[in-house]
Amino acid sequence: MFKRFFCFLALAVVLLTSCNTGGCYETTDVKVYCSFYSLDSLYAVAFDSVKVWGVGSDSLIYNNDSINELALELNRKAQITQYVFQVKAKKTDYYFTDTITFYHTNQPWFQSIDCGCMVFSTLDSCKTTGSIFKSTKILDSKIINKKKEHVILNL
């Protein structure tokens, strides 16, 4: 009797400790991070009163925020993602608008049962209309679930 109880107890401990109740330990947030620099890429720049929204979307991602970087999601179902960047000039209340276009390829990635499927991307190129940002530079083309500077937007 004691032997059966001990075996049952040992089996219960093994089974209960092997279950994962904590869920996903990986971040499933996959974004492209863009920083702002002066044209010579020497000085980081911050903006006040910024609005950012996706082309074809009426949802604001940033609204009158003061920011020094953008964290943007790429469209999982397309190979082109566009965002409108609008900044207000302090003295004149004039709005400057630029469109940032990302060209990318997508790769579905199954992390685990708890984490599910994510879509990683590779940036092929990045362009702007040139109204605010004069050039772009891709630092890291692999867009995965790690926070890392991917693109520099030069003024």
Image (cartoon, rainbow, N blue to C red):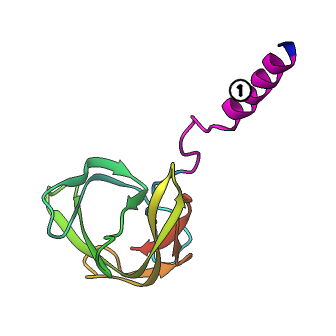
| Residue 8 locus on image (x, y percent) | 75, 23
> Farthest residue toward the right?
3
Q: Is residue 88 above or below residue 10?
A: below
Is residue 35 visible in the rendered structure shown here? no
| Residue 46 locus on image (x, y percent) | 41, 56
Q: Is residue 113 above or below residue 123?
A: above
| Residue 131 locus on image (x, y percent) | 25, 77
- Tell me the quarter of the image containing the N terminus: top right
Would you say residue 14 sits in the magenta stretch?
A: yes
| Residue 32 locus on image (x, y percent) | 44, 66
Left or right of 62: which side holds 105? right
Which SS type dominates the magenta stretch?
A: helix
Question: Regarding mark 1 in the picture, which secondary structure is present there?
Answer: helix
Q: Which residue is mark 1?
A: 12
- Tell me the quarter of the image containing the C terminus: bottom left
Q: Is residue 68 above or below residue 9?
A: below
In magenta, the rendered stretch is 3-26
Q: Is residue 101 above or below residue 17?
A: below
Tell which of 137 and 40 is nearer to you. 137
Bin the neighbour count of mark 1 within 10 Å (Cα to Cα): few under 14, some 14-19, many 20 and up. few
